[in-house]
Image (cartoon, grey):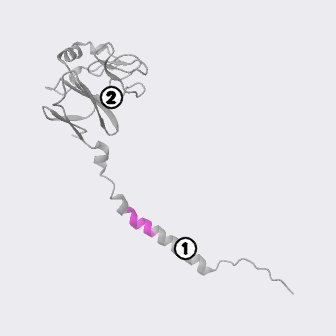
Amino acid sequence: MTTATLLPEQPTRRDVLYLATGAVAAVGAVAAAWPLVVQLNPDASTVAAGFPLEVDLAPMAAGQVIKVFWRGQPIFINHRTPQEIESAQTADWQSFRDPQPDSARVKPGHEQWLVVSAICTHLGCIPTEHQGNYEGWFCQCHGSQYDSSGRARLGPAPLNLALVPYEFLSDSKIRIGTTG
């Protein structure tokens, strides 16, 4: 009795054509579906600006600081007292490491409101309000101190607390995240 050895079948020309046709069809299906998937994404201007956040300031007492979140980052809203405003306006800001007058950090006519990022400019910690030597914020991680205008005064922080875009909708309501 003889044993026949079974050899694997060699692909035929028809097999190659089936594979090539299937690959072209798959690429075509992805190419046709791609615009449909992409159009589901939000508009680029919406993504860049983040969703606006409206905050009612009416319940805030003078001297109170609240923390809200916009675009995933904490924001301080400080209802400054007359003493804090005077201290911020009369400080010798030209000698600061990141010199900026108080008038450049608040909206004209609304000097009692300061809206800044709540992230320390040294290593990204969140400072605590009404701490330190300057009636502002103190970062307990490395000792950075900011005044009531959010300007870096002591410690390793190289820059002032960052300003965030906002506008007043009324005397008691702001919108954080405006694009205009």
Question: Which corner quadrant holds the N terminus?
Answer: bottom right
Q: How crowded is mark 2: few (under 14 residues within 10 Å), some or many (20 or more)?
A: many
Q: Name which residue lies at 56% across and 77% down.
A: 17
- By secondary structure, the bulk of the magenta-drawn segment is best described as helix
Whichever of callouts 1 and 2 sits on the residue coming sooner in the sequence is 1
Give the residue number, with chain letter if any, for mark 2.
Answer: 118
| SS for callout 2 | loop
Residue 110 drawn at (x, y percent): 16, 26
Q: On the picture, is 99 further left or further right than 10? A: left
Q: On the picture, is 127 further left or further right than 78? A: right
Residue 115: which quarter of the image?
A: top left
Residue 52 drawn at (x, y percent): 24, 41
Q: In this view, does 22 lie above or below 88?
A: below
Q: Name which residue lies at 31% across and 52% down.
A: 42
Kind of residue at disc 2: Ala
Give the residue number, with chain letter if any, for mark 1.
Answer: 20
Q: Magenta stretch: give its range.
A: 28-34
Residue 166 drawn at (x, y percent): 22, 35
Q: Nearer the viewer, residue 101 or 130?
A: 130
Q: Is residue 58 above or below residue 103?
A: below
Query: Rounded to the nearest whole Å, what is the CA distance between mark 1 and mark 2?
Result: 57 Å
Q: Name which residue lies at 40% across and 20% down.
A: 140
Residue 106 drawn at (x, y percent): 21, 26
Q: Which residue lies furthest to the right in this view?
A: 1
Question: Which corner quadrant holds the C terminus?
Answer: top left
